[in-house]
Image (tube, rainbow, N blue to C red):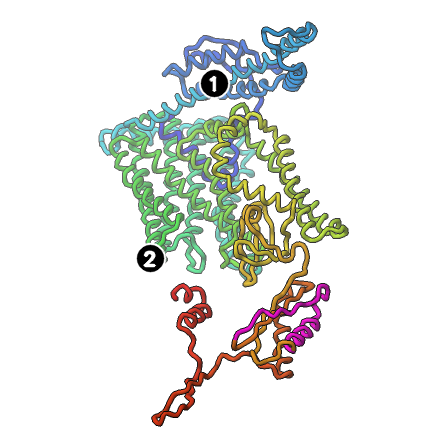
């Protein structure tokens, strides 16, 4: 097989949409398969030069046969060290070693239950005494017996572990050899295709293929048995040909008519969903027609090896062409009303459709060329000349497609100067397509045909995969809109984005195969992923995470159900207050989550003792980094146990007053009376000064200051204020209200009404009610409130010497006092400026 011929077969497989799903689990060819049957070792020994060893391919069902394994391993080591070993022989050896490795992996768990029991028995005997100490003879004898049994039971697992390591190393060595050979083939320099001296070889290869096909048909037609079979199968052959031609010629037209009538047949929300399946039928039905024609040609019994290869390759050309044409119509739609992934003009979209179809046909032609050159074993000169024209056209189409991608980036950048990640990736793809499309044909002109083929056609197929991902993303969005009733204009849903991300991850194996990765290498990566990774003596695999997630989810759900039951049915029937009920519910939640985690860890088989060393090494750094978090967490536990504050309490902490809304693990949320939420760390509530106005009772004192004119009767004022206080419904009478005469000046007298309220939460309402009642009663009793306006009368002598009074108007306050009052009334900023 030529170096350029190793890849188109992969491209052919990737042409179908279903391959993306099939490649998402590549380990099926490597793991879980039965041990291989005995192989033809003599043929392999002739290729590798290794000594023959009969019956080394299959490990026995009762357990690994280490003698046969040693023979196979030695032969594989010799084959990997020889440059003359065929690639097929290395791949066959590798497949056999993979099955042996799987058997060794299973054998490592031999006698696991019995070994665990013996270790528990040895642990029950206690630690072995020091050399200078004596031990009871029966205990020493029992310890020796158990140790001997443990060594015997551990021997099969240890041998399997050693053999597993050797098999794993041999697999890596064979993979390295195959990669080096693949690289050397890609870097080969073939005869220059632009050299006219090489053109006759290409012409001879084409004529030989055509002559070979005609010769095969003539020989088949000359055989009487073939003619008889053809006559018997002629009705079926004609039926297959008719059906195939009908699907190729009419299916696309019928699907287009159905798509045109779709708005009249379905509701508007279903039109976008059904448009993609109907459009996909325009590919699937013609492909089915091509397959029917291929089946009809094979049933004629007139095709030999060359004819069958040519017919299959021609069908593949049609498959790639039809698929590419469909992708082009979806990515570059004709109708401007259809949402397209790329923002291009009508002319640019038309060019995109032509380029997409052309690239698909060119990929199919390269597959045809590779198949015909391989079966006729034409030389590198013929392969180089035949590949070059198709390669130049493919490179030109790829470069033009890259230019269209850059046009899309330019259009989007003109609307928004800030380029997103998706737009930058599209620009990177466009530049890479232009570079490959220009440089690869230039390199092929000077003989680097395998390298050019290895870059151009994978780049084209990669663009096709990206286009398919875009179409599938649109399908996911439409399906999500149907299920949830979301408007197509709403782009804020997370589920379609996550599904699109999963589709992108599923496409990675396909992209890896396109760019030259071997299926066995992907299977090896999947095997390593399934086996997990080791931390100390603990091995953690994805299955452990799956079991852990399922068990923890069940425990978490059970905890939430228990909390809901306590909140709605059990705790309301007890004498606990609301704060105590919330503390019990929160405590049950913490305990339930902790127990769920422990049960999930044990069920997943994760040995935490193996992580003790790592945890000890990280504990110091984690301790410093999480010091505040741990402090707040412990403070939260103390708050739930001691309950100095509870949800609904009116508290003051660090100068902030408000109502406690929620107490979480790290912090407490307080809602101020301005309806602002303040997050307070739990450590501040434990170590700082906290005033709880309602936590231990709703009773609280209210002080209402009252100022009256200095000319009023103080006893009368005291009596009126006492009557007002005693008439308030929320004021308790034991202790009775207190009217406090705080002091007086030359202008006014200052009193205070001091009362105890039944519910301090209504202090503002009570204060307002008392103030209104004070104004009403003072007006009725003729008691004046202090006035801020005073007139100052001075006596001065006139010209005759007689004194006369003079009003100076409003009393002037000192400047410092006036400035202080102005700043206080204006706010903190005015006070700071004064």
Q: To which residue does mark 2 refer?
A: 414
Residue 597 is drawn in which quadrant? top right
- In the visual, does 499 lie left or right of 152? left
Question: Which tag, 1 or 2, sits closer to the chain's start?
Answer: 1
Q: Residues under labels 1 and 2: Cα distance?
A: 58 Å
**Residue at image x 50%, y 55%?**
492
Q: Quadrant where the N terminus lies?
A: top left
Circles 1 and 2, Cβ within 8 Å, touching? The answer is no
Q: Which-is-in-front pick, marks 1 and 2? A: 2
Q: Residue furthest right?
A: 573
Q: Nearer the viewer, residue 414 or 88?
A: 414
Residue 679: x and y, percent?
Answer: 53, 52
Decide: is 150 above or below 758: above
Q: Nearer the viewer, residue 278 or 481?
A: 481
Q: Residue furthest left?
A: 196
Q: Residue furthest bottom?
A: 800
Q: Residue furthest top?
A: 137
**Residue at image x 53%, y 60%?**
676
Residue 550 tag number: none
Decide: is 212 above or below 131: below
Q: To which residue does mark 1 refer?
A: 93
Residue 321: x and y, percent?
Answer: 42, 43
Query: Residue 721: within the magenta?
Result: yes
Q: Does the image show residue 353?
A: no
- What crowding class fits label 1: few (fewer than 14 Cα within 10 Å), some (14-19), or many (20 or more)? many
Q: Quadrant where the C terminus lies?
A: bottom left
Q: Does the image show residue 645?
A: yes
- Where are the magenta residues, as a range? 716-745
Query: Residue 349: within the magenta?
Result: no
């Amino acid at each position: 097989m030529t170096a350029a011929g190793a890849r188109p077969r992969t491209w052919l497989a990737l042409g179908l949409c279903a391959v993306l799903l099939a490649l998402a689990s590549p380990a099926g060819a490597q793991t879980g398969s039965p041990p291989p049957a005995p192989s033809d070792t003599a043929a392999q020994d002739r290729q590798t030069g290794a000594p023959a060893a009969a019956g080394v391919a299959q490990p026995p069902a009762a357990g690994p046969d280490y003698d046969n394994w040693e023979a196979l391993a030695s032969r594989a080591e010799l084959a990997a060290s020889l440059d003359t070993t065929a690639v097929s022989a290395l791949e066959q050896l590798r497949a056999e070693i993979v099955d042996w490795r799987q058997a060794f992996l299973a054998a490592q768990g031999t006698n696991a239950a019995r070994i665990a029991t013996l270790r528990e028995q040895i642990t029950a005997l206690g630690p072995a005494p020091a050399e200078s100490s004596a031990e009871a003879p029966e205990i020493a004898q029992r310890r020796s017996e158990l140790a001997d049994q443990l060594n015997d039971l551990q021997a099969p697992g240890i041998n399997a572990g050693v053999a597993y390591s050797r098999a794993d190393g041999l697999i890596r060595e064979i993979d390295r050899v195959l990669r080096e050979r693949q690289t050397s083939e890609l870097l080969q320099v073939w005869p220059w295709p632009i050299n006219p001296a090489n053109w006759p070889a290409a012409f001879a290869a084409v004529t030989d293929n055509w002559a070979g096909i005609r010769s095969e048909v003539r020989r088949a037609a000359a055989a009487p048995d073939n003619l008889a079979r053809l006559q018997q199968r002629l009705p079926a052959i004609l039926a297959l040909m008719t059906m195939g031609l009908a699907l190729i010629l009419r299916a696309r037209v019928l699907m287009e008519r159905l798509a045109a009538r779709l708005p009249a047949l379905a509701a508007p929300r279903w039109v976008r969903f059904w448009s993609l399946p109907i459009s996909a039928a325009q590919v699937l039905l013609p492909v089915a027609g091509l397959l029917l024609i291929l089946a009809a040609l094979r049933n004629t019994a007139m095709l030999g090896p060359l004819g069958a290869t040519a017919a299959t390759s021609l069908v593949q050309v049609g498959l790639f062409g039809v698929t590419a044409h469909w992708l082009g119509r979806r990515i570059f739609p004709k109708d401007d009303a259809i949402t397209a992934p790329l923002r291009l003009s009508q002319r640019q979209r038309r060019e995109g459709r032509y380029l997409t179809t052309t690239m698909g046909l060119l990929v199919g032609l390269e597959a045809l060329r590779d198949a015909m050159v391989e079966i006729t074993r034409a030389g590198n000169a013929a392969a180089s000349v035949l590949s070059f024209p198709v390669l130049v056209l493919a490179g030109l189409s790829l470069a033009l497609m890259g230019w269209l991608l850059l046009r899309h980036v330019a259009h989007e950048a003109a609307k928004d100067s800030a380029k997103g990640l998706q737009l930058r990736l599209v620009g990177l793809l466009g530049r890479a397509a232009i570079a490959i499309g220009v440089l690869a044909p230039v390199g092929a002109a000077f003989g680097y045909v395998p390298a050019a083929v290895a870059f151009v056609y994978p780049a084209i197929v990669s663009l096709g995969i990206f286009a398919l991902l875009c179409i599938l993303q649109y399908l996911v969005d439409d399906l999500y809109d149907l299920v949830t009733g979301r408007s197509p204009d709403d782009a804020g849903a997370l589920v379609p984005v996550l599904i699109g991300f999963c589709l992108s991850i599923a496409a990675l194996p396909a992209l890896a195969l396109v760019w030259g990765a071997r299926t066995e290498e992907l299977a090896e990566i999947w095997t390593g992923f399934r086996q997990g990774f080791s931390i100390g003596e603990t091995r953690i695999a994805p299955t452990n995470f799956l079991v852990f997630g399922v068990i923890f989810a069940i425990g978490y759900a059970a905890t939430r159900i228990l909390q809901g039951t306590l909140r709605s049915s059990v705790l309301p029937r007890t004498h606990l207050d609301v704060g105590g009920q919330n503390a019990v519910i929160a405590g049950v939640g913490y305990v339930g989550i902790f127990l769920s985690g422990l049960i999930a860890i044990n069920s997943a088989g994760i040995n935490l003792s193996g992580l003790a060393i790592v945890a000890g090494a990280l504990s110091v750094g984690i301790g410093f980094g999480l010091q505040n978090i741990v402090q707040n967490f412990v403070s939260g536990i103390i708050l739930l146990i001691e309950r100095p504050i509870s949800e609904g309490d009116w508290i003051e902490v660090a100068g902030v007053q408000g109502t406690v809304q929620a107490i979480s693990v790290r912090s407490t949320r307080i809602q101020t009376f301005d309806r602002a939420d303040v997050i307070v760390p739990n450590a501040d509530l434990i170590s700082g000064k906290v005033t709880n106005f309602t936590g231990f009772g709703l009773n609280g004192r209210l002080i209402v200051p009252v100022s009256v004119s200095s000319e009023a009767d103080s006893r009368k004022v005291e009596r009126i204020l006492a009557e007002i206080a005693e008439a308030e419904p929320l004021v308790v009478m034991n202790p009775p209200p207190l009217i406090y005469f705080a002091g007086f000046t030359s202008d006014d007298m200052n009193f205070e009404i001091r009362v105890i309220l039944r519910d301090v939460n209504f202090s503002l309402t009570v204060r307002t009610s008392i103030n209104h009642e004070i104004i009403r009663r003072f007006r009725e009793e003729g008691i004046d409130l202090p006035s801020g306006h005073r007139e100052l009368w001075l006596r001065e002598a006139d010209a005759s010497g007689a004194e006369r009074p003079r009003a100076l108007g409003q009393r002037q306050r000192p400047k410092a006092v006036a400035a202080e009052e102005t700043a206080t009334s204006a706010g903190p900023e005015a006070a700071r400026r004064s």
